[in-house]
Image (cartoon, helix red, strand yellow):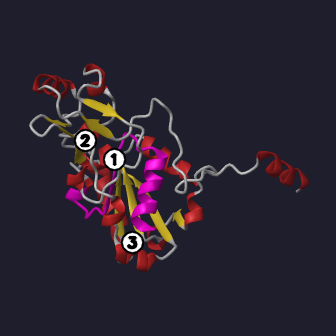
Amino acid sequence: MLNTLKNRFEQGYRTCSYPKEKPAVFERYRGKPVIQKDVSQKIVEMCANACPQDAIDIGLKKIDMGRCVFCGTCERISNGAFVKFTGDFEISTSKKEHLVTDGDLPALAEHSKQHFKKLFGRSLQLRQVSAAGCNACEADLNVLATPFFDLARFGINFVASPRHSDGIVVTGPVSRNMKTALLTTYEAIPDPKVVIAVGSCTITGGPFVGSPEITQGLDTILPVDLFIPGCPPHPLTNLHALLTFFK
């Protein structure tokens, strides 16, 4: 016991101060994309042709963050003349169409489910389902339980049983083999319940879009309340989305 207390004293307080203070992310992190509207159409077309996800709308000069895997190809080949990825990790939306952006995003707090806040109060229990994910999104959700992020201090926890949860967090492209298990889990969650789509694969199919083996977006089979884009979304992106939408 003395060794434990000594170690705790030596370690000090390691939990991040977010949301009171917005921590800095690594310089190489690619967050919210900002479009340079005055760029030539030729550069836009060049970026669109090089995009592996077909995430660039040439006519609107916008990026679909639901399809984007934040690879940075468009920024690199245009030298930032068309797209610049910022360090802003607060990029989640309550509506899928809001993910198609030129850099402007509606305030998530204004679209939060107020009745959810009244129902769940200071406690929100979530069941996470990996529907054929690669484990990247899953890993960045799991890290929220570490002392640095400490999701539980906000009354939000991941639980083992859907019958003990208030909602479902889905990762992965929802393969044909996982679709039935996912729907069964959803049905087991008592009403009212929330559905959260995490990562490009879940939102649109990601790199697997168009494949007959996956669902082309979670919202085609379940009513999604919250979209968290990324490949994978940064842990702070997940944290911001959960705190802003439900708290």
- Residue 112 in view, yes or no: yes
Considering the numbered disc 3 on the image, is that residue within a helix, a strand or a loop? loop
**Residue named by callout 1:** 229
Point out residue 95 in the picture as x, y percentages from the top left corner. 25, 58
User: As rendered, which of 166 and 108 lies closer to the eye?
Assistant: 108
Magenta residues (range): 219-247
User: As rendered, which of 159 and 4 lies closer to the eye?
Assistant: 4
- Residue 207 in view, yes or no: no
Q: Quadrant of residue 195?
A: bottom left
Badge 3 crowding class, 10 Å Cα cut-off, few under 14, some 14 to 19, many 20 or more, is many
Considering the numbered disc 2 on the image, is that residue within a helix, a strand or a loop? loop
Q: Which mark is residue 67?
A: 2
Point out the frontmost of discs 3 and 1: 1
Residue depicted at x 45% and y 55% = 240
Q: Does 186 appear in magenta?
A: no
* Amino acid identity at mark 2: Arg
Furthest residue in direction left, as rendered: 59
Badge 1 crowding class, 10 Å Cα cut-off, few under 14, some 14 to 19, many 20 or more, is many
Q: Earlier in the sequence, mark 3 or mark 1?
A: 3
Tell me the quarter of the image containing the N terminus: bottom right
Considering the numbered disc 1 on the image, is that residue within a helix, a strand or a loop? loop
Distance CA(mark 3)–CA(mark 1): 24 Å
Q: Quadrant of residue 33?
A: top left
Distance CA(mark 2)–CA(mark 3): 28 Å
Q: Earlier in the sequence, mark 2 or mark 3?
A: 2
Q: Which mark is residue 189?
A: 3
